[in-house]
Amino acid sequence: MEPPSPLGRRRIAEPVPAADDRLPERADVAIVGAGLIGLSVAWRLAAAGLAVAVIERGRAGDGASLAATGMLAAAAEHEPGGEALLPLCLESQRLWHPFRDDLEAASGLSIDYRREGTLVVALGRDEVERLRFRHELQRRDGLAVEWLSGPAIRAREPGLRPTVTAGLFCADDHQVDPARVMAALRLALRAAGGRLIEGCSVEALEREGGRVVGLRTGAGAVRAATTIIASGAWAGEGGLLPDLALPVRPLKGQSMALAVTPRSGGIDHVVWTEQVHMAPKGDGTLIVGATVEETGFDPDLTAGGLFALLEGARRALPGIEEMRIAGIWSGYRPTSDDDAPILGEAAPGLVLAAGHHRNGYLLAPVTAAAIAGLLVGGALPPVAAPFGLARFRSGGTA
């Protein structure tokens, strides 16, 4: 869903190859949702030789994928209670390098993978103490994170304020450009023979004898050996899966892009503060995000949300005052009840790949590998096995 604003989210144009994107009558795999997760899974399955159709009611990426910042931040994102999720995050971080290489080769596009690392900074004594607590957690859980003094931080990023008094350097936390990733996935999927059907609403699952055997859509029915739900924040909507009641909800975020100028200067690393994160992109923009709002599917941009982004960024980086606002938008994080993804078989013929919260870009490679392992190899890999739907039914968490 696009924000009601003349300043929309960033996109890049991709060549559109000749492709048959009509809804097929049959497929090996039918996937509901053409966001980052849906397209990543679809591409890997199509590359493995399966006939794949991805059905998207709007335009690919318009839920969370094109609204995201593209951070691959296993260390910076780690927080109390996240110990069970950490192995999955680290495995996906490891998989990102071959995922990037394969995607760029398959699509012919660069995804602007940047390796400078992430700085998590503190402004003032209270924030320093909270940052020390985070650092101890990271060290205890075996993460390679370096503590830096204020001068050491500013030596890496001279544009930061002198009030930046300490920070963490997460060398392995990299980033990609979401607009480029999504464009590359579209091309890679088509090159592998997969189909992407946009502007097509899914109305119901087709069932026979207790098994899901495909989908009924506004453009007709498609019969499939496996149906995958990868519809992001909409996966928890009850119309399609009333008997499952997936614990997934939308968590709204507002973000903006600022155009860096010679006068304003910029930054080279992703920089986190307690209020915002800032990510420089190869096209000369600086992404500032993101608010966290429990407002359901409300796309509105608000003065309070945008003020919080600007003020949070300005506290650390005064140069933003000279930057032009290049884009503002909102999106919906697909958040599960325990902030971890839901992966694997939910019923005969039905597989889930949903609930990635704010870690969609980080977890895309491991999710695609896990679902491919399930469909091609017959089982989820051990690192993904704890993240099935059954953990909610039993009252446990991942």
Image: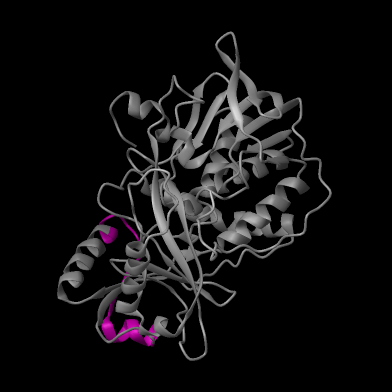
User: Toward which corner of the image does residue 112 lie, by quadrant?
Assistant: bottom right
Q: Is residue 274 visible?
A: yes
Which quadrant does the C terminus fall into?
top left
Residue 36 in the image, given as x and y percentages of width and height: 57, 49
Q: Decide which of 22, 349 is in the foreground and name it.
A: 22
In this rendering, position of residue 87 left or right of residue 362: left
Residue farthest to the bottom, as pictured = 263
In this rendering, position of residue 345 left or right of residue 303: right
Q: Residue sitting at 59 percent across and 74 percent down?
A: 283
| Magenta stretch encompasses residue 43 | no
Residue farthest to the right, as pictured = 18
| Magenta stretch encompasses residue 153 | yes
Q: Residue sitting at 43 percent across and 53 percent down?
A: 90
Numbered disc total: 0
Please say which color scheme the image uses: one colour
Residue 40 vs 303, above or below: the answer is above
Residue 105 vs 81, above or below: the answer is below
Q: Decide which of 38, 140 is in the foreground and name it.
A: 38
Residue 198 in the image, given as x and y percentages of width and height: 67, 42
Residue 148 vs 101, above or below: the answer is below
User: Toward which corner of the image does residue 305 lie, by quadrant?
Assistant: bottom left
Residue 379 in the image, given as x and y percentages of width and height: 54, 29
Residue 340 in the image, given as x and y percentages of width and height: 38, 42
Q: Decide which of 176, 289 is in the foreground and name it.
A: 289
Start-end of magenta stretch? 138-158
Q: Residue sitting at 45 percent across and 51 percent down?
A: 299
In this rendering, position of residue 70 left or right of residue 318: right
Residue 184 vs 174, above or below: the answer is above
Q: Is residue 73 visible?
A: no
